[in-house]
Amino acid sequence: MFVISIAALKRNTAILREVKEAAGCHLVLALKGFSCWKAFPYLRDDLDGCCASGLWEALLARDYFQKHIVTYSPAYDESDIDALCEFTDHLDFNSLSQWFRFREMVMAHPRFKKGELLCGLRVNPECSTGETPIYDPCVPGSRLGITAEQLAEADLTGLSGLHFHTLCEQNSDDLEKTLAAVDEKFGHILRLPQFTYLNMGGGHWITKPFYDRDRLIRLVRETHEKYGVEIWLEPGEAIAIHTGVLRASVMDVFESAGHRLAILSISATAHMPDVMEMPYRPDVFLVEDSETKSQQPTKMPAVVFDGESYHLAGDPTNPQSPLTYRLGGPTCLAGDVVGDFSFPRELKGGDIIVFDDMAHYTMVKTTTFNGVKHPPIALQHEDGRLEILREFGYADFRDRLA
């Protein structure tokens, strides 16, 4: 079961509200990272709206968040543009060819003429600061964003903003490096009177304890003063980080070639694909009953249930680690493995394992691959009450492809 903590969400958005107010900028939820719309009422007061990656996310923002909508997609078709012009507030384009294809259509729309619809371009500052190539949009030949060379002497009629998104789980020092590159390559465009906004994208780990929020505030204020434009931030992970868990049960335990293996009721490839794609190693907890509550560790998962105590699984490379198990899913994919984790006792069928930090870039990517049962989704209210939002059955698997 995926369980999202309302208290943890509100903790994050309270931090974000303080930052955006101190910086004098706008901050929206990136739906590509977290789009559980039943949680929107608990986020709406602290945030300015949503960032959508296309028409369907924009419709979700319109219907359930009901505030400002920023839309960007690597490509649109004519029906997308026709629909988005009716309600999105920012419409950002990935290439000059897309903008020129749809410019007359957009500029003829009544909302554009009244200033209710603003258009921008995503740019590529060609300044790589991350460590994982699959998440770096600044690599040579990137399909995301327009380079300074491509933009040279382009007709900018109808445009009001620029948009860059180059960070992924990074601190504000990397934003500072990126802004220097943006100023060098696109600063002359931002200083044009027709440009009124700069979208700094997402990837800002603002709600992490180590994040330098003071530097972010300074950078935003300096950028606003330099160009005289409104600043927009669109984090997804910073909003939903450490706000949810995925609870699984141990289905089978056995040994093979000297390895202890545990098959779980959840799948890495189907239910937590970023463990394989990013990749990253989640914190894993073994749930015990209330009799072991005195052994409860200081680092707890985001969602805590009454009558349960959690043991944090250790690193198997630690010589003090007692019993190491390779945690895997129930699919046919040989690589459907979360990783090796060490526990304080032997695992057995029926044990409950909790994976921390599973609310962002997890539920938005889940599949029904292999017909594996999809975990239910629940909200945990601030009084501890669980509200089941969605349970999945055979019909969800059957109807997906026909």
Image: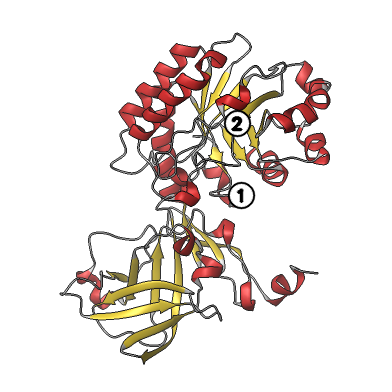
In this orientation, which residue lies closer to the viewer: 396 or 253?
253
Q: Nearer the viewer, residue 293 or 174?
A: 174
Relative to 320, is 280 above or below? above
Q: Where is 189 relative to 393, above or below?
A: above
Name which residue lies at 44% across and 74% down.
Answer: 337
Question: Which color mode does the image show?
Answer: secondary structure
Residue 307 visible in the current orientation: no
Where's residue 371, x and y in %? 64, 77
Residue beneath disc 2: 146
Type of amino acid at the residue the image marks with label 2? Ile
- Image coords of residue 91 (percent x, y): 68, 30
Assess disc 1: are there few (<14), some (14-19) or many (≥20) residues with their C-alpha within 10 Å of its C-alpha: some
Q: From the image, tell me which residue sits under label 1.
A: 37
The tag on residue 226 is: none
In this view, the residue farthest toward the left is 320
Q: Residue at x 54, y 40 (%)?
A: 29
Quadrant of the frame with the C terminus: bottom right
Viewer-closest of 361 and 69: 361
For residue 340, which quarter of the picture?
bottom left
